[in-house]
């Protein structure tokens, strides 16, 4: 840390020798105004968006002739509009959970490989390729999912059905693999780069002294990772996962391209059909009348609330074990 | 549980840079050997070759022989992981595992070596903490994180962690340089007790400390910046501090250096 005296930037005190009173330079004043102004502007914009969404949502929900939360239908046109978010909430949560279950372990594995196993010659190109994956537009993922993934997943689906079909969740009888599970797989691939690169950065920041502590006790490479790297990187991996989850929850184009939407909640994840908030909004918004738009906005508000809850939960998990966090040492 | 170390013709490199040159010495069991010498002369590097930690550094390479009794640590087929379980190390900056409790810190090495019954684990942890003079201060908060202790306590926790696995040799790289005089004394007393059981090697910049704790002292020096460090002499501590056989040693010890 640098304890040397800061350079003297204030204007010299008045000739009287008094040091009271303030000496503020124009630069300070401009910067203060700018930062305060943008802070306020941000709050105003947020409030305006919130008010707008809430107002339109209230209009929609009060006009809904069925239960907004439990109805398995989306019919917002006509005199008897009946629509509910049950299918959308289910589909969004299920596809995101599938994506997380696949992506996070794989991402942590790749990140550990890059940070602790791969020779340097291999590590940086690999990291670069992973980062590149993040730059692919989501519609491209969607097209690849629809044209390649869907036709090729039949084998995996039959296999799942053979071994796990008895659970009901993985039962499958020949059909197009345009299901929530396929969406989950596609989302997993899409969030892999962000989760991987953030985790990798965290793993690379583990202080050498923590790793050497384990090594000096006679830990193998994997034991070093278990004792020093993973505990230190835990909160970072959670944050990385949340970034990925945020993207999975809100992903629109890729889901809309792959899923064959329906307003049913099937017992099997492998059955075609279902929907997500973002996909439903994207596919219905352009043809909706004002009331239909309000209904879609209401569903968007629910998605927003879910995202907030998920982030809050993640923060709680990180904060709960703060006293054990590596940052405190 | 203490073994003799016999080093012959040891060179260590960082990439192309040779850090220590042709070092040979014998380190007696159940005694304290101190390494002294100017900064950059390769004391830490040499210490780290004694438990094969040097090769962990990218580019780190070692030539020569380190015999632990009659086993060459650098022999083919020797697993560095196994070496480090036999030769323990305490670092300059206390480095307890920050996410582990005090108990788990001490038990960490034991858990690596195999599974112990809970009661047995408790006994060993208690014994090690007593051995490290820390038991009385932490016995009521064994489940609190180790990073919540003071620096001196953390260092003694690291010593407890190192001795819990009953190593043959204990290497200490400036273990007191981050500590206040009282914690330093506590650790010096501890070293005096531990040498009954272990072979101890300690690197220190503190001449008084070397004189107080060690039985033998090795003086390292380097010809010039960028040149590899060499062992100048190793002898009984009393002799090194009263009547060394090399002039450079006397100059260094009396502060007439460079
Ligand atoms: N990680 C490293 N990479 C490259 N060179 C290194 C590294 N660590 C040490 N060196 C070099 O090796 C030489 C010996 O360093 P070493 O740390 O062993 O000295 P030391 O005697 O322990 O010094 P000090 O008393 O300051 O701790 C020095 O020239 C140093 O620059
Ligand atoms: Mg050193």
Image (tube, coloured by chain):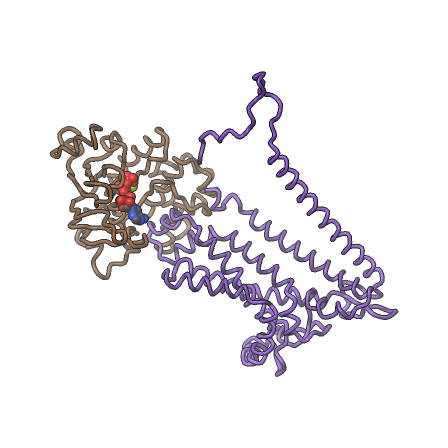
Q: Residue at x 64, y 73 (%)?
A: A257
In the foreground, A233 or B256: B256
A116 relative position to A107: left or right: left
Give the residue displayed 45% in from the left and 47% down from the top. B100
Number of numbered labels in the structure image: 0
- What residue is at 47 percent from the left and 43 percent from the top? B145
Q: Which chain is brown?
A: B
Q: Quadrant of the N terminus of chain A?
A: top left
Depth check, front residue: A148 or B193: A148
Which residue of the protein is positioned furthest toward the top in this rendering? A16
Viewer can see residue B171: no
- Chain A: its colour in the image is purple
Residue A194 placed where, x, y %? 53, 60
Q: Is residue A239 visible?
A: yes
Q: Out of A257 and B190, give the one closest to the viewer.
A: A257
In this rendering, would B238 be left or right of A163?
A: left
Relative to B189, say whether B71 is above or below. Answer: below
Q: Residue furthest bottom?
A: A174
Q: Nearer the viewer, residue B18 or B74?
A: B18
Q: Residue at x 14, y 32 (%)?
A: B239
User: Residue A302's x, y, as percent?
Assistant: 72, 59
| Quarter of the displayed picture in which ligand 1 can be seen | top left
> Above or below — where is A141 with respect to B122?
below
Q: Quadrant of the C terminus of chain A?
A: top left
């Amino acid at each position: 840390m640098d304890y040397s005296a800061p350079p003297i930037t204030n204007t010299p005190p008045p000739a009287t020798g008094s040091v009271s009173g303030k000496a503020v330079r124009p630069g300070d004043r401009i910067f203060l105004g700018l930062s305060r102004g943008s802070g306020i502007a941000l709050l105003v914009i947020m409030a305006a968006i919130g008010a707008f969404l809430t107002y339109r949502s209230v209009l929609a929900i009060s006009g809904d002739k069925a239960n907004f939360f439990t109805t398995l239908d989306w019919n917002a046109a006509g005199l008897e509009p009946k629509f509910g978010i049950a299918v959308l909430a289910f589909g969004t949560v299920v596809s995101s959970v599938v994506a997380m279950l696949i992506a996070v372990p794989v991402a942590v594995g790749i990140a550990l490989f890059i940070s602790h196993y791969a020779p340097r010659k291999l590590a940086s190109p690999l990291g670069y390729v992973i980062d590149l994956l993040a730059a692919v537009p989501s519609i491209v993922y969607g097209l690849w999912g629809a044209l390649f993934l869907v036709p090729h997943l039949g084998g995996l689906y039959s296999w799942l059905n053979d071994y796990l079909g008895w659970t009901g969740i993985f039962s499958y009888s020949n059909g197009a693999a345009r299901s929530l599970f396929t969406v989950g797989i596609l989302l997993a691939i899409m969030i892999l780069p962000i989760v991987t690169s953030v985790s990798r950065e965290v793993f690379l920041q583990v202080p050498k002294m923590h790793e050497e502590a384990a090594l000096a006790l006679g830990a193998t490479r994997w034991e070093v990772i278990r004792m020093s790297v993973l505990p230190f990187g835990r909160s970072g991996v959670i944050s990385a996962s949340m970034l990925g989850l945020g993207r999975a929850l809100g992903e629109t184009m890729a889901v809309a391209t792959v899923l064959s939407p329906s307003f049913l909640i099937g017992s099997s994840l492998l059955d075609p059909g279902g929907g997500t908030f973002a996909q439903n909004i994207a596919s219905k918004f352009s043809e909706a009348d004002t009331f239909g738009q309000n209904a879609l906005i209401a569903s968007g508000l629910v998605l927003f609330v879910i995202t907030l809850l998920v982030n809050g939960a993640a923060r709680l998990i990180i904060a709960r074990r703060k006293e054990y966090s590596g940052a405190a040492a | 549980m203490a073994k003799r170390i016999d080093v012959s013709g040891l060179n260590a490199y960082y990439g192309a840079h040779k850090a220590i040159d042709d070092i040979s010495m014998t380190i007696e069991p159940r005694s304290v050997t101190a390494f002294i010498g100017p900064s950059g002369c390769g004391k830490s590097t040499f210490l780290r070759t004694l438990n094969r930690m040097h090769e962990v550094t990218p580019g780190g390479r070692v030539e020569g022989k380190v015999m632990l009794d009659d086993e060459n640590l650098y022999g083919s087929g020797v697993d560095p992981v196994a070496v480090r379980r036999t030769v323990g190390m305490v670092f300059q900056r206390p480095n307890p595992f920050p996410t582990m409790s005090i108990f788990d810190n001490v038990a960490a090495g034991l858990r690596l070596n195999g599974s112990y019954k809970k009661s047995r684990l408790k006994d060993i942890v208690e014994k090690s903490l007593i051995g490290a003079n820390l038991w009385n201060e932490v016995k009521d908060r064994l489940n609190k994180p180790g990073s919540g202790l003071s620096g001196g306590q953390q260092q003694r926790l690291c010593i407890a962690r190192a001795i819990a696995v009953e190593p043959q040799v204990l290497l200490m790289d400036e273990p007191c340089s981050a500590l206040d005089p009282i914690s330093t004394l506590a650790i010096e007393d501890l070293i005096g007790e531990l040498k009954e059981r272990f072979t101890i090697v300690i690197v220190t910049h503190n001449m008084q400390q070397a004189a107080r704790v060690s039985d033998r002292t090795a003086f390292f020096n380097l010809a010039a910046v960028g040149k590899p460090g060499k062992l100048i002499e190793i002898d009984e501590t009393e002799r090194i501090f009263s009547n060394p056989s090399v002039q450079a040693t006397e100059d260094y010890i009396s502060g007439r250096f460079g």
